[in-house]
Amino acid sequence: MKSFNFFLLWIFGFFALLAFDLFVEAFIFEWLDWNGTNKNDWFFALWWGVVAVWVFLGLKNFFCF
């Protein structure tokens, strides 16, 4: 895969992760009445972990081309 195509997919992944986070915050947490509580902390820790893995693996793959 060319570097530019990989970069576009990598950026699209960030937007997909952000859209998933916004969906969960807007609908799922409201449905479960978790907004304003500490019950949603596990989700944010997991989400930031996935974002960090996405960044580091993407950078590794981008600079290995």
Image: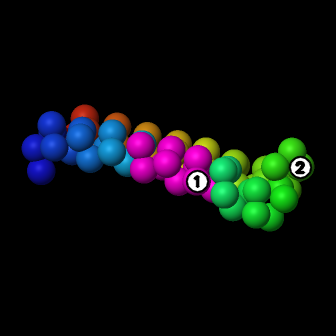
Under circle 2, the secondary element is: loop
Q: Is residue 21 magenta?
A: yes
Residue 45 vs residue 4: left or right?
right
Dot 2 corresponds to which residue? Answer: 37
* Disc 2 residue crowd, few under 14, some 14–19, many 20+, Cα 10 Å: few
Give the amino acid at mark 1: Phe
Q: Nearer the viewer, mark 1 or mark 2?
A: 1
Residue 60 shows in this picture: no
The earlier-in-sequence mark between 1 and 2 is 1
Q: Residue at x 16, y 43 (%)?
A: 5
Under circle 1, the secondary element is: helix
Dot 1 corresponds to which residue? Answer: 23
The image shows residue 59 at horizontal and vertical percentages of: 34, 37
Residue 4, quarter of the rendered image: top left
Give the amino acid at mark 2: Thr
Residue 34 vs residue 58: left or right?
right
Residue 51 shows in this picture: yes
> What stretch of residues is rendered in magenta?
15-24
Q: Residue at x 76, y 63 (%)?
A: 31
Vertical side of 19 occupied by 28: above or below:
below
Q: Count up the numbered dots.
A: 2
For the stretch drawn in magenta, the main secondary structure is helix
| Residue nearest the viewer, comparing 57 with 50 | 50
Vertical side of 62 occupied by 49: above or below:
below
* Disc 1 residue crowd, few under 14, some 14–19, many 20+, Cα 10 Å: few
Q: Residue at x 70, y 55 (%)?
A: 43
Residue 3 vs residue 61: left or right?
left
Q: Residue at x 42, y 43 (%)?
A: 14
The image shows residue 29 at horizontal and vertical percentages of: 74, 57
| Residue nearest the viewer, comparing 32 with 6 | 32
Per the rendering, the mark at residue 58 is none
Cα separation, mark 1 vs mark 2, equals 18 Å
